[in-house]
Image (spheres, rainbow, N blue to C red):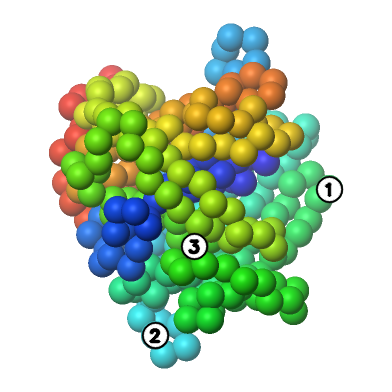
Amino acid sequence: MIFIQLFLILISFFTPADNNICKQPNTSYKDGEKIKYNIYYNVIGIYVGAGKAEFTTQLGSFEGKDVYTFTAIGKSNKRYDWIFKVRDVYESIVDSKTLLPYQFTRNINEGSFHQTDFISFNQKARSATTLGVTYPTSDCTYDVISAIYAARNIHYENLQINEKVYLNFFLDKELYPSYFKYLGKEQITTQYGTFNAIKLAPLLVKGSMFKGGEQMTIWVTDDSNHIPVRIQTPIIVGNIKVDMVGYENLRHPLNSLIELVQ
């Protein structure tokens, strides 16, 4: 199982155009933020800890510009490494004001499969270049990592139940259009605790792992941080659940947390 790629696909089908999220200033995170997740797999009615993911945010410079560097690291649990060892690293470098990407890299190490991808974005020209070939994109195009962070700046209070919000992102030499549906608010209890949460349903494309459609559910904190705290979805065989289990250096208090799990 491709743990980090799965996690990124799960939460990357967010946002901008119709709700003016594109190029909005960042209001949800700051330099030094770190969020940790556990990934669980269920095939016979019992969820088993399959892997971990960690997302970090760092403020810096890139070619003379102020940028955020978003890094996502995914690992299989060591006790399962003998079956299928995963050590994946994703990195997105984005403009600190527009939050649009300049550069995206992906270093995949999964079992005997190894791959490194590099994408350079030209937002003015609406293009992305990878392996020496330039592809057309669109206004406000993200990679899978920068899309996650842009989505955290959505003003959910402006959405109506079942309203759709759209996004374009570029990956694997293709521009992907998608959307998520706002399902309202509810309380949810995760491995970490009980939260007031915002409930979302992204559109998934049917593939080798996913059934497609709107069967996935994502819960993000109903506070100014908008952290995904649970993601749950059926796959072709079994189910996947992802829970937030730790954090550092949040920009805002985690006011959505009602009670910690004892």
Query: For mark 3, what is the residue?
Result: 142
Please identify the quarter of the rendering in which residue 105 is found.
bottom right
Q: Which residue is mark 2?
A: 65
The residue wearing badge 1 is 112
* Mark 1 crowd level (few <14, some 14–19, many ≥20, 10 Å Cα): few
Q: Quadrant of the C terminus?
A: top left
Is residue 29 shown above or below 223?
below
For this rendering, which residue is in front, 101 or 21? 21
Q: CA distance from mark 3 to mark 1?
A: 29 Å
Mark nearer the N terminus (3 vs 1):
1
Residue plotted at (57% across, 68% down): 137
- Asked if one can make out residue 71 in the rendered structure from this viewpoint, the answer is no
Pair 3/1: label in front: 3
**In screen coordinates, is 66 left or right of 214?**
left
Instruction: Write down the quadrant of residue 17 in the picture.
Output: bottom left
Say what amino acid the circle numbered 1 marks.
Answer: Ser
So how many labels did they put on this image? 3
Give the mark, 2 or 3, whose residue is nearer the N terminus. 2
- Kindly identify the amino acid type of the residue bearing the numbered disc 2: Lys
User: Residue visible at 19% across and 42% down?
Assistant: 157
Determine the secondary structure under disc 1: loop
Q: Amino acid at mark 3?
A: Tyr
Query: Where in the figure is residue 191, as x and y percent of width and height?
Result: 38, 25
Residue 244 in percent (x, y) is at 39, 36
